[in-house]
Amino acid sequence: MSFSKLLTLLWMIGLVWADASTKHYIVYMGQHSHPTSESVVKANHHLLASVTGSLLAAQEATLHHYSKSFRGFSAVLTPSQAQQLSERNPVISVFESRMNKLHTTHSWDFLGVDYIHQYNHLKMDLGSDVIVGVIDTGVWPESDSYDDQGLGPVPTKFKGECVPGERFTLSNCNRKIIGARFYSKGFEAEMGPLESFNSIFFRSARDSDGHGTHTSSTIAGSMVANASLFGMARGTARGGAPGARLAIYKACWFNLCSDADLLSALDDSISDGVDIISLSLGPDPPQPIYFEDAISIGAFHAFQKGILVSASAGNSFFPNTACNVAPWILTVAASSLDREFNSNIYLGNSQILKGFSLNPFKMESSYALITGGAAAAQGIPAKNASFCKNNTLDATIIKGRIVVCALEALTDNRRAKALVVRQGGGVGIILIDPFAKDVGFQFVIPATLIGQEEAQMLQLYMTTNKNPVARISPTITISNTKPAPKVAVFSSRGPNILTPDIIKPDVTAPGLNILAAWSPVATEATAGQSVSYNVISGTSMSCPHISATAAIIRSYRPLLSPAAIMSAIMTTATVLDNTNHIIRRDPDEAETNPFDYGSGHINPTAALNPGLVYDFDANDIIKFLCSTGASSKQLKNLTGETTYCSYPPKPSYNFNYPSIGVSSLNGSLSVYRTVTYYGEGPIVYVAHVDYPAGVRITVTPSKLGFTKTGEKMTYRVDFVPYKQSNGTYVFGALTWSNGVHRVRSPISLNVVSL
C-alpha cells in the first residue's frame, strides 16, 4: 500500500458483519482432476453439506470457489464446522481468512530505460503479447495512460474476461486493458457491506481508491505528455513496459484485501494466462507461515505454471518486518529517485528553512507563527496540544496563523493535523517530522514537513523574535539530486523471519514520490481535489517497477523461468548511488545492508543480459522446505500433493537462490550454487569476493569456463569464521565477472561459533 494510507489504516475501526459465532474460512484442497469448474463447485457443496447438514445451507455458506488453478472454497463457518472439515478427505487445510493491506514521469529515466532507443531493438514493441496481471483496487479506464493506439490484437493465449459492473462495461476494456474482474464477497463477509463505509465505491473493476490505477499505469501505462500533479513532477508519464497488456483483478476495497478474495484473483489470473502477477499488498508483520498464507499458496501455483509473482515488502519501517518473503516471490523494497519536492519556509529574518511537501498553494504574504503547545485549548496540557490533534487547539489563538505541530507517534495521521488547524482558522501548518519528511504529503492548507535540524533553527527564531512570522512557499521540483537512490525510511527490512537463510527483501526500486495515473474520485489522498495523476509513496510503488522490468525480460527472453527472471533482476542490481558510494537510508543517510535493499537497486538494462542465472523449480522449493522442517502435511498444504522429504534433507543454505545466506554459521561450512550461462560463444567468468568481517572465504573453482548457452556449472563457497558476530549479521558479496557482465550475489552470515 502507499505509505500514507498505511498510517490512515492504523487508526481505522473495523466493522464485523458475520455473526460473532462464525468466521470466514478458506478450505484448501490443492490440485484437482475435475473436468470442469462446475463439477468442482458441485463437489465443494456436497463436501460442505457434510458439516452444515444440508446442501442448501452449504450453498448459502459458500462465498468463493477456487476451481481453475487449484481446488478449494471459502465459507462462513463455525469453528466446530471448520474443524470437522479439516478432518475430511480431500481437504488439505482450513484456515481463517485474514485481511491484507495495500502496501512514472521520471523514475524510468532514472533507471536508464529510454523508451525510444531502448525499445526499438527489443521485442517489447507495440505488438507485445506479455500480459501482466495486477491484483489491486481496480482501474480508471478513461485515463490517457490506458490508450491502446498502435497495439495489436489481444493475445490469443489470454483466456480472461472483461466483467461488466457498476460504471464499467465491455467497452472499458481495450487492447491495453484486456481483462477486468472484481471480488468482494470475502471482504464483505469479514468487514460488512461496502455501503457501510460511507465512501465512494463501484461494484465493478472501476477504481475509486486510485491505488490500482497508479500501480498498473506504472507497469504498462502508455506515453502521456505533460503529465503532472498541479505542475509538480511535470514530464512524460509512461509505464516501464508500455507495450505490455494489463489484466485487472480488483480484490481490494478501502485499502484492505481479504485473503479469500486474493486467492480467488490468483486462481483466475493463473488460469487466464498472465505472464507476470503484480501484488502491491501484503499482511501486517509478523508474516504468516507459508503453509497458511493465501498469497504464498497462490504464488506457488503461479510459479509452477511459469508465472513470476512480484510483491511489495511492506511499509513497516523496522527490522524483521518484511512480508511476502517466500523464495518463489520476488520481494521488493522501496528507494528514492534523484528528485525532491521542496516547499521551503521563508522566515521574517530572511532565513530560509528547507521543507518537503506537495504543496500547490501560494501564500501572498507572511503570517504569524505559533506552536500547537502555545495554543492549547482550555484544560488541554501544552504537550498534548503540540501534536495538533482534534479538540486540542484554541481556535481563537490559531486563527490567521501558521501552526507548528509535532508528531506524537510515527503512525500519526499527518493530514488530519492540517484539517484540525484549518477547522480552527489556521492558515498553514509546519509539521516537525524527522522520520518521513522526504515523503510527499498533500494537505488541505499550505503545509510543509521539516526535519530536526530545521526544527531547531525554527525554534531559535521563534524564541528570539517578539513577533515571529513566516511564509510557506509552493512546492518546486528539484531534479538531479545527490545522493540517490536512498532506501526509503518506511521500507520494511529483513532478516526473513520465516526462513532467514533466504535474504529478504530481494531488491529495491523507486517507491518514493512516484507520479502515475490516478482515479479522479479518489480525493482523500489529494486533499479533496480531483486529479488525473498523483504522487504517492510506498513499496506499492516500487513493486510495479519490478513487475515492468520482469515483463521486459519475459518479452526479450520468453523461455526464461520465473526463477531465472528473478536472478537476472537480482544479480545485475547495483549497491552504489549516483555518487558512487554505498546506498544509504532515509532520513539520516544511515548505513544500509542487504536486509534494507536485498541485492541492490534495479538496473533494467543490465537485467536483459545477465550473463549467468541461478535457476530453480518447484521440486527445488520442496527440498528447500524440507530443510526447514516442513512436515508432509504442510507440504501437501502448499502443493496439494502428497510429498515426502528425503533424509538427510539438503541444507536450506544450499537452495540455489541468487543470494547467499547462512543464519547460523557454526564453524567452517561449504555452500553450493549452480549457474546457467546465457551468452554467445566460449567465455570465462572469474570470482571476486567482498569479505564479511571475521570470515575467510574461498571459492572453488575460482574460474568458470563456458562453451555454449544453457551450460550449467556448480561451484563451492567455503566459509571459515575466525571471529564471532555476537548475534549480528555480517555482510559481503560474491561477484562473477567476465569483463563485461557482473553477476553479484550478496552474502549474509550470522557467526554463532568458530
Image: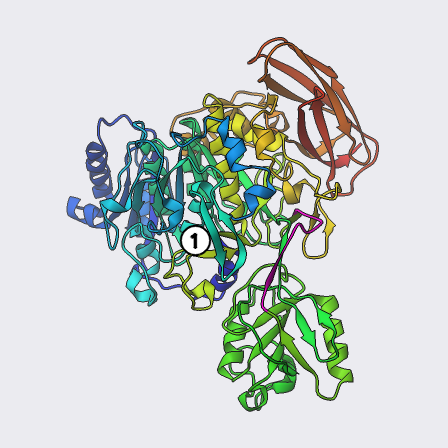
Amino acid bearing label 1: His
Query: Residue 424's x, y, as percent?
Result: 51, 84
Farthest residue, direction right: 722
Is 524 located above or below residue 207 in the figure? below
Q: Residue at x 65, y 85 (%)?
A: 374
Is 453 located above or below residue 6 in the figure? below
Colouring used for the render: rainbow
Q: Is residue 368 left or right of residue 136?
A: right
Q: Nearer the viewer, residue 91 or 716?
A: 716
Q: Residue at x 35, y 54 (%)?
A: 207
**Location of mark 1 (residue):** 211
Q: Residue at x 58, y 31 (%)?
A: 605
Q: Is residue 183 left or right of residue 107?
A: left
Q: Is residue 18 left or right of residue 482?
A: left
Q: Nearer the viewer, residue 371 or 366?
A: 366
Asked whether the viewer can see residue 438, the reply is yes
Q: Residue at x 68, y 57 (%)?
A: 587
Is 374 located above or below residue 93 in the figure? below
Query: Residue 349's x, y, as percent?
Result: 75, 79
Determine the secondary structure under disc 1: helix
Where are the magenta residues, as a range? 474-485
User: Badge 1: few (under 14), some or many (20 or more) residues near its Cα, within 10 Å?
Assistant: many
Query: Residue 411's x, y, as percent?
Result: 56, 64
- Quadrant (top left/top right/bottom left/bottom right) for the C terminus: top right
